[in-house]
Image (cartoon, rainbow, N blue to C red):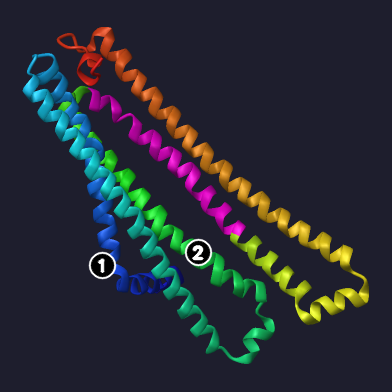
Amino acid sequence: MTEPSMRYQTLFTFLRGFSGGIITQMTLVLVNSTLVVLPALVGQRLIDDGVLEGDMDLVLLLGGVLVVCALIQAAIAYIGEVHSAWLGERLTLRMRGDLVTHLHTQRPGFFSYARPGAVVSRIHGDVGGVQQMLASTLPSLTGAVSTLVIAGVGLLLLEWRAALVLLLLAPVMYGLAVYFAPRLREASRREMNAYADLDTCVAEQFGAEGAEVVRLHGAQSTMSGRFLVKAGHVRSYALRQASLGAGFGAATAVTTGLIGASIYVVGDSGWWPEQRVWARLSPW
């Protein structure tokens, strides 16, 4: 078994104890994604069969359904956020406890060559990264995928030819993900390593022995400059990660906007002669 496989097996074994909470969180995300798309389907029936047909009873009924959907969605969103935070903090507490217990089992020689900052970074930074992945990234990814699938099904029910046009979005989004994902992952890895170096630098300078050595040799300016260099590395990698994330979001927004505009342009150009897309997909 390769080392990456062993790591994944260890991670899955650890997460098995949180399977109930993870399943609950994924269920809340899926239900919320369904409720996000449902108002569009109800609104289409409200316009076509209620407003245009002059059926006020149906308008009031479907309007009430929209209000109920909004209330349920708000409640589920609130519960999902609270449950996600609870699950992430519970997992973080367990990981930090296991890590500290494991460190106490190491031989004294381990601490003679291990960098204090690296150990501190593992307890704070790396554990926090895993918490963010399970409490934020994974639910967001699941919600985005489920919303995309459910929205695709809903669009097929509303206008299947427009759904075929939207299929153009899939390879473009996949290409953006392939381009940005490894760069974001590398920037995140470098940022964590830079935090470890910074923690080591702080521990060396401001420990009892380190501070005395710096004072005796008059190296305050040198050590301050060293600290600023390492802090600059942290800033650079953080800005790199933020710029990549913003670039991915901007590219996604532009792509989605272009595809959406093309639906209305192609629809109004007569590709659907019996009924224009704008009239079917928009209430105005």
Residue count near mark 1 (Cα–Cα under 10 Å), binned few <14, some 14–19, many ≥20: few
Distance CA(mark 2)–CA(mark 1): 21 Å
Above or below, comparing residue 208 to residue 122 in the picture = below
Q: Amino acid at mark 1?
A: Gly
Q: In the image, what residue occupies the spot 57% across and 58% down?
A: 189
- In the displayed structure, 47 sits above or below 135; it is above
In the picture of the structure, the residue carrying the numbered disc 1 is: 20
Q: Which residue is mark 2?
A: 128
Query: Left or right: 2 with respect to 44?
Result: right
Q: Give the prevailing secondary structure in the magenta stretch.
A: helix
Magenta region: 162-191
- Report the quarter where the N terminus lies: bottom left
Residue 190 appears at what percent x and percent y? Answer: 61, 57
Q: Do the residues bearing badges 2 and 1 touch, measured as CB atoms within 8 Å?
A: no
Tell me the residue at 65%/84% (across/down): 111
Q: Looking at the image, which is closer to me, 203 or 144?
A: 203
**Rendered location of residue 69, percent (x, y):** 20, 39
Q: Earlier in the sequence, mark 2 or mark 1?
A: 1
Residue 192 appears left or right of 172:
right
Residue 140 position (above or below residue 170): below
Indicate whether residue 275 is drawn in magenta. no
Quarter holding residue 274: top left
Residue at the image position 22 percent from the left and 48 percent from the top: 31
Q: Amino acid at mark 2?
A: Gly
Q: Is residue 208 left or right of residue 105?
A: right
